[in-house]
Image (tube, rainbow, N blue to C red):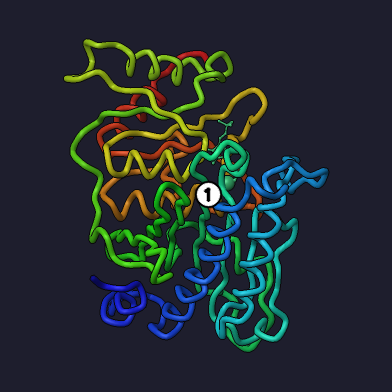
Amino acid sequence: MISLRKFIFHHNNNSLIEKEDAYSFFTIIESVTKIIRNHISGGYTSSIFQKKDTQNIHGENQIELDIIANNSFKDMLKTHKNIAGIASEEEKKIIIFKEKEKYGKYILFIDPVDGSLNANVNIPIGTIFSIYSRITPIGTAINEQDFLQSGNQQIIAGYILYGAATILVFTMRFGVNIFTYHPSHEIFMLSRKNVKFPNSDNIYSINEGNYHFFSKNIKKYIRYCKNPNNAKIPISSRYVGSLVADFHRNLLQGGIYLYPNTKSHIYGKLRLMYECNPIAFIAEEASGRAINGNTRILDIVPKFIHQCSPFFSGTTSMVEILKKFISTNTNN
Ligand code: AHM
Ligand code: MG
């Protein structure tokens, strides 16, 4: 069995992050995972799953767990020697770690609790993160420009899925690896190496309750998925409502995740920088695809930190077929 720390130490020699920095980053991830999964396990005995009066930048009511997880990541990440600042779904503005703003080499995006409204019904939730090298010169203070990079520039992207098991899935550019949290040893152990999407197109995952607000082309694609004449075996519909859980199932079983723009989310609901980009990076490293419709997610140049985007990600063949539907000339 290979522990996460041993893996970081002995593998990924070609990664774009210094080994020592990756090592201390994943040590932090391991510690915060422990805190969050303990809160989740005991959550029903407290009020941490209840909606609060406070809202995040997207106007969504937070639950206490959102705030606990956000604060835990902030507190631990600021101890990292080279992380100069972070942007979080739960923070309106970027957080600059003052003492490192001039010399820290990296910035980080985080969605501390993805799918948090599922916590109260004991459905898997996640954490999503990604790291970039800063673009301003070392020795000057970091600023928002350091965060506004296209997803192509990510050097680490990953997610934690708090399900029946707690797992960590990440890429440092050379493949995707899965680690499982060992509850007695309190560390992550390597469980699957160099994961690729399987060569099967079994699943489509979409909130179909929004059907009447989708474009004609997306509606047509959904009808195509349901049409038994179009697939060797029926394509199953599966939707958890936690991006991390839906994506992870499709990564292992073969499928596509769709969150198009809708009437209430005219630019899409998912957030480009801390949801779409990290998942897209992992998808591509696993030989899949991720697009916003016509454009590769990783090529989008962000205009602001909390930007939203339509998001479609899954096996290459499913995304390519979807793309043909999207580019068909129909009145939307
Ligand atoms: P979050 O705001 O807790 O991070 O969750 C965003 C979630 C995604 O995880 C999920 O795929 C999507 O929003 C579900 O949205 P909907 O309930 O509209 O289907
Ligand atoms: Mg989220």
Position above or below: 227 against 309: above
The residue lying at 43 percent from left, 59 percent from top is 158
Expressed as whole percent of the image width and height from the top left, the position of residue 12 reads 29, 75
Dot 1 amino acid type: Glu
* x and y, in percent, of residue 197 in the image: 25, 44
Check disc 1: other Cα within 10 Å, few if <14, some if 14-19, many if 20+: many
Snapshot quadrant of residue 94: bottom right
Q: Is mark 1 within 8 Å of ligand 2?
A: yes
Residue at x 42%, y 68% (from the top left corner): 155
> With respect to residue 191, does 288 lie above or below?
above
Q: Quadrant of the N terminus?
A: bottom left
Q: Secondary structure at mark 1?
A: helix
Residue 176, position as x, y percentages in the image: 30, 59
| x, y percent for residue 162 | 47, 51
Out of 298 and 287, give the one closest to the viewer.
287
Q: Which residue is mark 1?
A: 275
